[in-house]
Amino acid sequence: MNPLTRRRLLQSAAAGMALGGLGLGRAVAGGPQTLRLGVAQAEIMPGLPTENIWAFDQRVLRLRQGEAAQIKVTNALEEVTTVHWHGLRIPHAQDGVPYLSQFPIGVGETYTYNFTPPDAGTHWFHPHCNTLEQLARGAAGVLVVEEAEDPGFDADAVIELRDFRLGSDGQFLEFTRARNAARGGTLGTIITANWQSETRLQAPAGGFLRLRLAVTDITRVFRLAVAGAEAKVVALDGQPVDSPMGISPLPRADGSEPEVGPNTWPLVLGPGMRADLGILMPGPGAEVQLRAGLPGGREIVLARIAATGPDLQRKMFQMPVLPKNPLPELDLDKAETLDFTIGWSPEGDAGTSGICGDAPYRFWSIDRKLWPGEGPPDPADPIAPLATLERGKTYRLRLKNETQNDHPIHLHGLAMRVSSPDRRALPPHWADTLLLRAHEEREVAVVADNPGDWVFHCHVIEHQKTGLAGLIRVT
Ligand code: C2O
Ligand code: CU
Ligand code: CU
């Protein structure tokens, strides 16, 4: 029996979408799936519909682990695009990076992606063309890869966390400012959960809710906590953690600026990152909140989850255990160490051709090298990789952030094992996006098991687009 028919699948209200069919939480479909990226309207600010939203017609896509997927993407925008499947370890040809793995999908064209997701978990998808504007206007979705066997949560829900940068009339403001791009990035004005300032969900009282959080924002680092229930982090970036990490119920209440740490804001997710929480819902009628901390000590409620129905009376020790994904075996004894420096750019305001959406500045770099952008490659001057990895070998990547900003560093195609101690006290885990804090140095390990030229970039998109990107080649 399909586990989704047994389980109560949670759906948020259609997030105020004025356009029909922007579905959330549709069940896994057999056969080919379709995605359409087009222009829509949405009511992010009540009563002030935002025009010129660019959105996929499905904001949650469900696939099944180990089953071949075929996704037909129709580009109904007035400009070219591609779709990248962030977090999926799939063949390079399906990775959705313009010119590197495919030609952009032309206006009005349909392009079919074919892959079999090896890893279950919470991933996401987004364009990799003119990424700053396309993502800022809404083009992203959460990609849920269901486990081959249902792990047995009583409910499953998705929360997409992102900002919209809207003026008081509800319309988009400029997405980037040079002075911000050279610093932390340009923040949105409205913080949303499932495109609402406060989203409402339900889950069975006394039952286990699997809450999938995905940060699809281009800039904001979310500092999160759960109030009103016991919660554990059961997966990060889609990969089950070795031992679920309890997260404390509430940050400090004295109004002081919350420090990042195990007893304050227990969960910090930067752009591109995901976390699955296992939440033991309270008794009937009670409410669980997902809260976020903002600079200046302010707190907001992003989601309210009502406990409904008869009390299932589960106990914390009965929390379902997520099965491990087929990740490669690390051979750390023989691993070579590669150093990468995240820093300023030697070029300042040198622009590039900008065919697939580049900014006219170069503020950042990896190893002081310039990323030539997402335009058509010049055969006479191909992009040189930052490093070339030999297939099958294990490498330690040492990332040094010499800047005073945070950088969520994302690697396509390979999983990174994060084990060095850090300020957030996360246990060792696998990730595809590592939040490198200001002046921090971190080490990750990878097994070069997936051949191709993989993009390695900051997921603060203004940083990516102004130089913080490179290639890692696996031969
Ligand atoms: Cu999520 Cu290269 O991106
Ligand atoms: Cu990616
Ligand atoms: Cu960055």
Image (tube, helix red, strand yellow):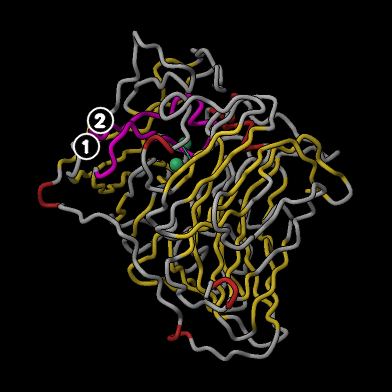
Expressed as whole percent of the image width and height from the top left, the position of residue 23 reads 69, 55
- What stretch of residues is rendered in magenta? 449-475
Is 362 positioned to the left or the right of 225 in the image?
left
Q: Is residue 128 magenta?
A: no
Give the label on residue 338, or none: 1
Tell me which corner region of the image, top left, top right, bottom left or bottom right, holds residue 246: bottom left
Is 104 positioned to the left or the right of 169 in the image?
left
Q: Residue at x 53, y 79 (%)?
A: 230
Depth order, front residue of 322/405: 322
Amino acid at pointer 2: Ala
Q: Quadrant of the C terminus?
A: top left
Give the label on residue 387, or none: 2
Depth order, front residue of 109/131: 109
Expressed as whole percent of the image width and height from the top left, the position of residue 361 reads 52, 18
Q: Is residue 454 magenta?
A: yes
Expressed as whole percent of the image width and height from the top left, the position of residue 187 reads 63, 40
Disc 2 within 8 angstroms of ligand 1 (CB): no
Depth order, front residue of 410/462: 410
Tell me which corner region of the image, top left, top right, bottom left or bottom right, holds residue 344: top left
Q: Residue at x 18, y 40 (%)?
A: 337
- Of helix, strand and loop, which one carries label 1? strand
Expressed as whole percent of the image width and height from the top left, the position of residue 265 reads 52, 63
Amino acid at pointer 1: Leu
Q: Is residue 335 above or below residue 369?
A: below
Depth order, front residue of 22/435: 22
Point out the residue furthest to the right here.
47
Point out the residue furthest to the top here.
380
- Label 1: few (<14), some (14–19) or many (≥20) C-alpha neighbours in 10 Å: some
Q: Is residue 455 above or below residue 382?
A: below
Is residue 407 at least partly visible in the picture?
no
Which circle, 1 or 2, is nearer the viewer? 2
**Contact? badges 1 and 2 (CB < 8 Å):** yes
